[in-house]
Image (cartoon, rainbow, N blue to C red):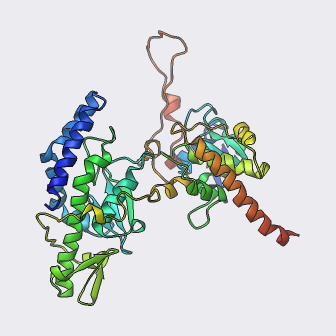
Amino acid sequence: MADNQSSEKKLSRRKFLVRGGLGTIGVLAVGTYVLRNPIRRAILEKANEMDLAYMGSTDNPMLWFELSKDNVVILHSPKIEMGQGTFTGLAQMAADELEISMSKIKVVHATTATGNIDGMSTGGSTSISGLWQPLRELAATFREMMKIEAAKKLGVPVSELSVQEGIVSGNGKSLTYSEISEGVTDWTVPDAPVLKDISTYKFVGKPVARVDLADKVYGAPMFGLDAEMPNMLYGAVVRPSKIGAKFISATTDKAEKMLRRDQNCK
Amino acid sequence: MKISMIVNGQSHAIELTDEYTPLLWVIRDILGLKGTKFGCGKAACGACTLHVDGEAVRSCSYPVKFAEGKQITTIEGLGNAENPHPVQQAWIEEIVPQCGYCQPGFMMATAALLNKIPNPTDEDIDNNIINVCRCGTYYRMRKAIHKAADKQNAINKINEPAKA
């Protein structure tokens, strides 16, 4: 790998961060995640196993990246954005390795049903440091997979191809990522993606606009309370009027007749 | 019983068993407009703020029967990406939201304030925008409110000669 040395450095710095950190059980779990290379590899392996699923059209289940028809890369984040700027940081990291501008990358929360599940959750300031290596590797892998397919479609060797703004070009011909992915069912996954030199990054380490703001001012983001399932019922806790009251029984027949959304929609 | 009201320009007739159901639950759970949030449930935090006939109302504690025949505006009706409200524009420019949960309530409260006080002073803001934000976005919010006021006044100026 191109920056093996710098990745070693990163890991030792992470050790420091964890040891010097909060020292709670939660942080220990995070430390396990950060320090265990096999888990990092497993993330990558799992992602690679699921090429078809996550690189298909927008309505397919996917793991990390999804391509829209207008060549926007949708990054399915395993980390929660709650105002700390994680989506923006992940977008910066991914955009630089994907060779695509920040405006052409959209970050969404991965779903537990179809997406990449991060058992270590979000916390301890580990989202960026923990995903620094795996996300860039995934993005670089994605970019190289695009180049390999582009080489076949354009009839130009991979070594003569270059990528700019999500467009792969060579020998005067070019295709967008979106065009490359059309009809591809059997992706070739390179073993070791070569990461770009950090000094050439256009977005990492530079001030960029937050990517999560627009949705938030229109009331669009889904919070836990906003989740809805078919025929979902709503409940509220009825609390006793006295301290130390003991539960004996409850009359629920009236509550059971109360409103349900499907009965009330006009 | 049936309640009729206009929400974001669309008329609705809603069948309810309890006329004291908070307007918030009708907006969120019956009409499916999830941008208006539930916070404290006792009209203290302002996350549920929306407009009833142009007035900022804390909908968690507002029985839906009082909305009969009225115009309701929620964050979804304030503006959208194609046609953002000056408050929403200012909120983006001043990078106000962090987690974003309480922000629709703040923006609705601000939009109502600017209709009453087009050039609010810091004191006006302190007295009128009394919602709660746990991320602590107040500092940027204050700047955004002033900016939104400027934007709205500029728009009003353009529209004035047309009225006269």
In the displayed structure, B80 sits above or below A80; it is below
Question: In this orientation, does residue B5 appear?
Answer: no
Q: Left or right of A74: which side holds B57?
A: right
Quadrant containing the N terminus of chain A in the rendered view = bottom left
In the displayed structure, A148 sits above or below A208; it is below
Could you say where residue A160 lies in the image, as x and y percent from the top left? 18, 83
In the displayed structure, A128 sits above or below A136; it is above
Q: How many marks?
A: 0
Which residue is outermost to the right?
Answer: B164
Residue drawn 74% across the image and 51% down it:
B114
Q: Quadrant of residue A141?
A: bottom left
Residue drawn 36% across the image and 74% down it:
A69
In the displayed structure, A39 sits above or below A104; it is above
Q: Quadrant of residue B142?
A: top right
Could you say where residue B38 lies in the image, as x and y percent from the top left? 55, 39
Quadrant containing the C terminus of chain A in the rendered view = bottom right
Could you say where residue A40 lies in the image, as x and y percent from the top left? 17, 49
Residue drawn 51% across the image and 58% down it:
A214
Q: Nearer the viewer, residue A250 or A157?
A: A157
Q: Left or right of A128: which side holds B154?
A: right
Which residue is outermost to the top?
Answer: A244
Q: Left or right of B120: which side holds A224?
A: left
Which residue is outermost to the bottom?
Answer: A172
Q: Left or right of B32: which side holds A57?
A: left
Q: Nearer the viewer, residue A229 or A125?
A: A125
Could you say where residue A263 lies in the image, as x and y percent from the top left? 52, 48
Question: In this orientation, does residue B35 appear?
Answer: yes
